[in-house]
Amino acid sequence: MKYAFLRKLFIIIFQKGGYNKMKWSTDDIPSFVKERQYVDTALVPLLPIDFGDGIRQSSAMTEFITVMTAEIERQFRGRMLLVPPFTYLETKDIEESCKEVERWIHHMKEEQVKHVVLITADPSWKKVEAELDELLMWMPLVPFENMDADYKKQVISEQIKQLIPLVMDKWKD
């Protein structure tokens, strides 16, 4: 049951011919290169990895942010590229991770990416948010583990409604 919603979402997103996605894949990157002037925003998930006591929370964050970024990318297809997640050890100092993310941002900017949007459910990032040069969207974790499919859709929809204005404001900069 836990994966039924994700499977349905996957089917909807990748329906034959029904979706012009922009993800980090060999199928989509040629479109990105061709339409680079219009695709000016990179969406970067920030995902903690923990193999100890926090493994359940780490996996819940990954599941939640993966679903949310797929939906955000779908909402802004043609303008936003979903890149591979920045993963880091939960035990690592957040300051070190922040510096590494800044290197990612710098590299993307050198390659003419105009906007970078970072998204996470890890509250540690709130401590270093002011140090980041780009938009950090922190979302409180909503574990999907025991939710029924209809309620998950509703939660995702409500969360996305809150995020869309943040991205739109970022583009006004």
Image: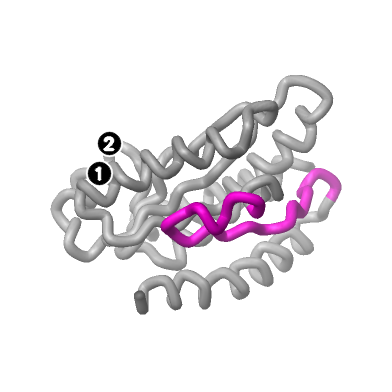
Disc ID at residue 26: 2
Between the C-alphas of marks 1 and 2, the distance is 6 Å
Residue 167 part of the magenta-drawn span:
no
Q: Nearer the viewer, residue 94 or 23?
A: 94
Please rate how many residues cluster around mark 1, counting C-alpha atoms within 10 Å: few if below 14, some from 14 to 19, many from 20.
some
In this rendering, is residue 158 above or below 34?
below
How far across and down, in percent of the image, does residue 41 sit? 34, 59
User: How many numbered badges does the structure rendering display?
Assistant: 2
Write down the region rendered in magenta.
Answer: 126-146
The residue under label 1 is 29
Q: Which quadrant of the figure contains the C terminus?
A: bottom left
Tag 1's secondary structure? helix
Residue at 48%, 61% in the rendered image: 135
Q: Is 61 rendered above or below residue 72?
A: above
153, 55: nearer the viewer? 55
Residue at 33% over, 38% down: 25
Q: Secondary structure at mark 2?
A: loop
Q: Quadrant of residue 91?
A: top right
